[in-house]
Amino acid sequence: MLTVLESESSDNVPGNDGFRDAILSSPVRFGGRFPRSPGDFSCGSPLPMTTTPMAGFGPVQVYFGEKNGKYPDGNQVVIRGSDTLAAFDTPLVANRIGEVLAPVDLVMLSHAHEDHMAGLHRLAHAQVYVHEHDADAARSWPGLAAHYGLSPASLPAMHDKIVTEFHYVPRPDAIAYPDGHVWELGGVRIHAVHLPGHTAGHCALLVEPGGILFIGDIDLSGFGPYYGDASSDLAAFRQSLARLAGIDANVWVTSHHRGVYTDRARFAAALRAYAAKLDERNQRLLDLLRAAPRSLEELVHERLIYPPEYQEIWVVDAERRTIGLHLDELLAQERIRQDETGRYVVRVAS
């Protein structure tokens, strides 16, 4: 599950960067590596027209969800080769572009969360691929429940929520793919790039020609990275952000919020700000512990990632797991310790 909250400040309003508006108003050139508009691309037939806002990059079309794909919605990516039509994820917007998605042959999931599977109920005929570490989560509700890691008491409500609001259906036929897997669509190639942290199997998907990189829930939002599930990993997220910075691409597409970047300098700046949230959260914990020793549950009550007024099924579990990962990191760095009561205390420099 993606659990992004954006403030109403201009810095965090989805789409305020102006990147999507720039994409929609003028085609982007890439030195002739692929044509200027989707209709000029030689692979397959043009996709049906839709009133949903979209942007095209050669074989790739991006259909924007509500508020630039702000959760619970997302941004839908469709890729047309000469003999195969593919989609990256199926967010809620997939249900509003039925004619576009109906002929899809393949769905590559960036990871297994309810907001990325919300259109799979429409695509029973399509092959669904998901990274091997997220495969169990895509295949069954017990697998997805274990993936979330919610308290047992929360699971019935979560199941009802994702069925009612996200049209959830499991895909027991989902095919596991490894890091580096390649799909050939006919004149178009897709590479899987494993970027774990958000989930154990979270991946970016790179389309060539053109260097169009779908980065999933590394969404560059003002909320920052989310790693509150049972399979989430803070250290892996740090490594994935470093790896992402080095991937050669021309266009970066996020599942949520920011939409599309076409300028590497702006993308790099957004990625640095996003990554900086990790250390900001460490500092927030250190400030709380300097004020007074606190237990994990006391820190959960204080909240690290969500405002106190925000209530959702997963919030307490996600706070507990996120804070726990940061505490483990700070313990390993010998910046904090536990006292005789089990509370966390900032170490005094010797």
Image: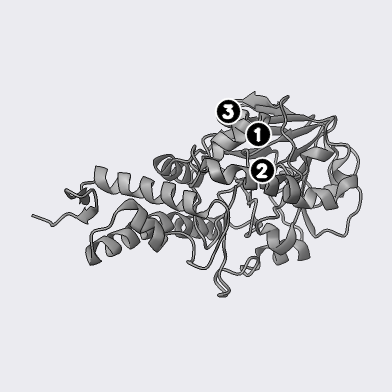
Question: Do tag 2 and tag 1 residues touch (Cβ < 8 Å)?
Answer: yes
Please give the name of the residue rendered at 42% of the width and 41% of the height, measured from the top-left corner. 239
Compared to 42, does 22 lie above or below?
A: below
Location of residue 61 in the rendering, given as x and y in whole percent from the top left corner: 78, 48
The amino acid marked with disc number 2 is His
Out of 201 and 55, give the one closest to the viewer.
Answer: 201
Q: Which residue is mark 2?
A: 159
Q: Residue at x 61, y 46 (%)?
A: 216
Asked if disc 3 and disc 1 are in contact, CB closer than 8 Å, the reply is: no
Label disc, if present, on residue 226 of the rendered structure: none
Closer to the camera, 38 or 55?
55
Pinpoint residue 311: horizontal percent, then vertical percent. Answer: 56, 61
What residue is at 68 percent from the left and 33 percent from the top? 190
Q: CA distance from mark 2 to mark 3?
A: 32 Å
Please give the residue where the numbered disc 3 appears in the rendered image: 180
Crowdedness of circle 3 by 10 Å Cα count: few (<14), some, many (20+)?
few
Going by the numbered disc 3, the residue's amino acid type is Gly
Q: Tell me the CA gap for discs 2 and 1.
A: 8 Å
Residue 293 lies in what quarter of the image? bottom left
- Label 1, residues with CA under 10 Å away: few <14, some 14-19, many ≥20: some
In primary-sequence order, the first of circles 2 and 1 is 1
Q: Looking at the image, which residue sits at the far front? A: 153
Residue found at the far bottom of this picture: 9
Residue named by callout 1: 141
The quadrant where residue 132 appears: top right
What amino acid is at disc 1?
A: Trp
Label 3 element class? loop
Q: Is residue 288 visible?
A: yes
Compare residues 217 and 212 and report the one nearer the observer: 217
